[in-house]
Structures are given as structure tokens and as C-alpha cells.
Image (tube, rainbow, N blue to C red):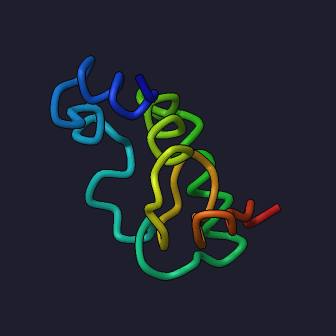
Amino acid sequence: MSPVLVMADDYGAQRWMELAACLNDDRFTGVKPSASESIEMLDICFGCEVFQDCLRYHDYSDVIGVFAAGWWREGVSGCSLTGL
């Protein structure tokens, strides 16, 4: 079973997303952040209680245009670490 499916089984309907420190923070979706925003966002990600869940989910999904688990997700194979 893939990690994404296991995660959905363990947390039910992606419950972990409701616990994310970035929930309702618009900087994490849509527009690639500036270098200074990226540093702030990295701090939020690395301090988040569901960081590992987010990392597993986004490593196995094709979600793009989102800053997740410390990375700006530009495309399936186009992830780039920003702000460093």
C-alpha cells in the first residue's frame, strides 16, 4: 500500500491537514514566495506537528503551486527549495 493510502487510513480523510500550522495562510499556495517569505515559511513548516505527514503526502502526490514540507512544489518533477 502506498504511503498516501496508509496515511489516509491512519488519519481518516486527511485529518492531518486540519492540524497543519500553515492552515489558512495564503502564502503557502498559489504564488511562489520570495526568499524572505520562504525563510519564514520554512520556520513554520519545520515547527509543524504534522510536518512528516505533509512531507509523505506531497512526495507522493502531484499537487503543484504549493509550499509544502519546506519545498515549493512547482511540478511533479520540478520541486525546488526556495529561500536558501
Give the residue drawn at x 44%, y 40%: 57
- Position of residue 42 in the picture relative to residue 10 (left or right): right
Q: Residue at x 44, y 62 (%)?
A: 63
Q: Quadrant of the N terminus?
A: top left
Q: Residue at x 46, y 51 (%)?
A: 61
Q: Which residue is located at x 49 percent, y 82 percent?
A: 31
Give whichever of 10, 68 is nearer the camera.
10
Residue 54: horizontal and vertical position, in percent?
45, 39
Instruction: Residue 26: give x, y in percent of width and height.
Output: 35, 70
Please identify the residue farthest to the front as the structure is shown. Answer: 1
Where on the picture, by quarter, is residue 55? top right
Q: Determine whether 53 is above or below 21 in the image.
A: above
Residue at the far right: name it. Answer: 84
**Of 5 and 24, which appears nearest the observer?**
5
Q: Position of residue 67 (x, y in %)?
A: 52, 61
Left or right: 14, with 77 as reference point = left
Is residue 81 left or right of 6 when viewed as pictured?
A: right
Is residue 71 positioned above or below 72 on the image? above
Please determine whether, in this image, residue 7 is positioned above or below residue 48. Answer: above
Q: Give the residue furthest to the left.
A: 13
Q: Nearer the viewer, residue 15 or 38?
A: 15
Q: How many marks?
A: 0
Q: Residue furthest bottom?
A: 31
